[in-house]
Image (tube, rainbow, N blue to C red):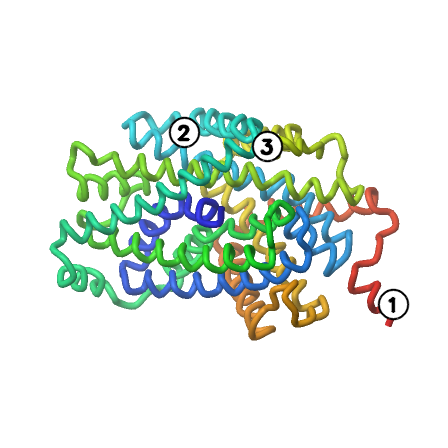
């Protein structure tokens, strides 16, 4: 699920963006390595939290335990209105763009195709967890096969290691702050989604053994995948990298597989994105189930079909709001709407590792190694990304923040008397 969730539209969009902005494969590889390391630092913190609180809900549970019910409610409010529909809408648009590029159809149809595919994957989610996990499994295999094909084809057409070395070393000049900012934001988006696994912890067997391997091992694999694809792009780039990302991918496909199969790579992208969309729709309802258990979300809306592993009402809400965002905004605007506020709450939930007392050293809980270094590195990454978004997309960033902030006064209606957090209870008991 980690590989399928993370390796989506970013696997092809981000290398293209990096090559246009930094113009150097060496710089791109450094960015991938740094972003991968910092994301793994966050995953280490989530690995401890998921094993300490193996319940459905992920970040909501961590915030409730570390900072109290009100902060957890505001996070759930933000997720319902900003994060979950925003991620779904962005993936729906990405899938539509590459389906149309593969077919050579009019780009004006992006919104129509995006809405249609989002609804179709919503129906897949309602069909049950067996259908969704089958899609996740096969798209994960397909993504790894795509990477192997890309790297192999690029190396074969460029004549092996010597040619590769010349191309990778090219373009290693100085990088401006704007180019670096664009690349960091793109790379963070490409790594996004690994934290969604936390919502599924209650349904995972042996969380102490499984969750650290899935989160940390999955991100190590993702980092290697992204670095390999970046190298393949550089080796096969047909001249200067410009134009839209979809056009660039088609051009890369033509360079690798010939003009007649030039759109094959766009089909590969569509397969990759479809797995991420299925994973997002599958994981989202689990958090609202946790909120309903705490009395912070209407139980009827959070009704969960245990046999199917699906929540019809919540899936309908997520799909409807995502379709509304698709009709109102572009891909970049949607990213600016949901990514900054999501990043903020991601940092806050991971920071529960600092606020909660250290767990005992036994076999029941995964303990964060080198504590508190991983969380401090992760918070540094989050602060950098937030600053870049505020400079680059202030309107969309403030809009998402305003919707999330509206949850604060709402929380006083829902939670007139807030129950103390686990930390507060321990403090009172001495």
- Is residue 86 visible in the rendered image? The answer is yes
Which type of secondary structure does the marked residue at label 1 adopt? Answer: helix
Q: Which label's residue is closer to the chain start, 1 or 2?
A: 2
Mark 1 vs mark 3, foreground winner is 1
Q: Position of residue 189 (x, y in %)?
A: 46, 51
Callouts 1 and 2 close, C-beta under 8 Å: no
Residue 135, disc:
none
Direction from residue 136 to residue 281 in the image, left or right: right
Mark 1 vs mark 2, foreground winner is 1
Front in this rendered view, residue 331 or 162: 162
Q: Quadrant of residue 259?
A: top left
Query: Marks 1 and 2, Cα distance to the nearest angstrom?
Result: 56 Å
Q: Is residue 135 above or below residue 190?
A: above
Q: Which label's residue is closer to the chain start, 1 or 3?
A: 3
Q: Residue at x 34, y 39 (%)?
A: 269
- The residue tagged 3 is 321
Question: Mark 2, residues whose alpha carbon is within 10 Å: few (<14), some, or many (≥20)?
Answer: many
Front in this rendered view, residue 18 or 154: 154
Q: Is residue 129 above or below residue 193?
A: above
Q: Position of residue 289 (x, y in %)?
A: 70, 40
Residue 428, disc:
1
- The residue tagged 2 is 110
Q: Position of residue 236 (x, y in %)?
A: 19, 50
Query: Marks 1 and 3, Cα distance to the nearest angstrom?
Result: 42 Å
Q: Residue at x 54, y 65 (%)?
A: 378
């Amino acid at each position: 699920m980690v590989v399928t969730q993370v390796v989506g539209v970013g696997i092809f969009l981000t290398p293209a963006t990096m090559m246009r902005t930094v113009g150097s494969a060496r710089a791109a590889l450094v960015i991938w390595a740094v972003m991968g390391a910092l994301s793994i630092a966050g995953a280490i913190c989530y690995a401890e939290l998921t094993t300490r609180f193996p319940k459905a809900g992920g970040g909501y549970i961590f915030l409730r335990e570390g900072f109290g019910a009100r902060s957890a409610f505001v996070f759930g409010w933000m997720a319902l209105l900003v994060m979950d529909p925003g991620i779904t809408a962005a993936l729906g648009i990405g899938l539509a763009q590459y389906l149309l590029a593969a077919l050579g159809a009019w780009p004006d149809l992006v919104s129509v195709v995006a809405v249609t595919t989002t609804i179709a994957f919503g129906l897949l989610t309602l069909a049950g967890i067996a259908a969704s996990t089958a899609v996740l499994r096969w798209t994960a295999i397909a993504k790894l096969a795509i990477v192997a094909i890309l790297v192999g084809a690029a190396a074969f057409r460029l004549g092996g290691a010597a040619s590769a070395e010349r191309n990778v070393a090219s373009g290693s000049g100085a990088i401006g702050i704007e180019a670096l900012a664009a690349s960091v934001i793109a790379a963070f988006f490409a790594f996004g989604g690994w934290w969604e696994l936390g919502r599924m912890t209650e349904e995972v067997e042996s969380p102490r053994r499984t969750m650290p391997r899935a989160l940390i091992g999955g991100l190590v694999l993702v980092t290697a995948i992204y670095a390999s694809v970046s190298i393949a792009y550089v080796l096969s780039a047909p001249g200067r990298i410009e134009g839209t990302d979809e056009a660039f991918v088609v051009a890369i496909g033509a360079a690798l597989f010939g003009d007649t199969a030039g759109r094959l790579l766009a089909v590969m992208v569509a397969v990759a994105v479809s797995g991420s969309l299925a994973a997002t729709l599958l994981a989202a309802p689990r958090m609202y189930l946790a909120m309903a258990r705490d009395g912070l979300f209407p139980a009827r809306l959070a009704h969960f079909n245990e046999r199917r592993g699906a929540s019809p009402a919540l899936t309908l809400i997520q799909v409807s709001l995502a379709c509304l965002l698709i009709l109102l905004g572009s891909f970049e605007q949607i990213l600016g709407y949901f990514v900054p506020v999501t990043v903020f709450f991601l940092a806050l939930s991971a920071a529960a590792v600092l606020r909660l007392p250290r767990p005992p050293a036994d076999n029941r809980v995964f303990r964060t190694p080198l504590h508190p270094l991983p969380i401090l590195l992760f918070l540094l990454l989050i602060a950098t990304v937030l600053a870049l978004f505020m400079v680059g997309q202030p309107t969309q960033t403030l809009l998402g923040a305003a919707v999330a902030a509206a949850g604060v006064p709402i929380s006083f209606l829902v939670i007139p008397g807030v129950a103390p957090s686990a930390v507060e209870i321990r403090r009172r008991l001495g």
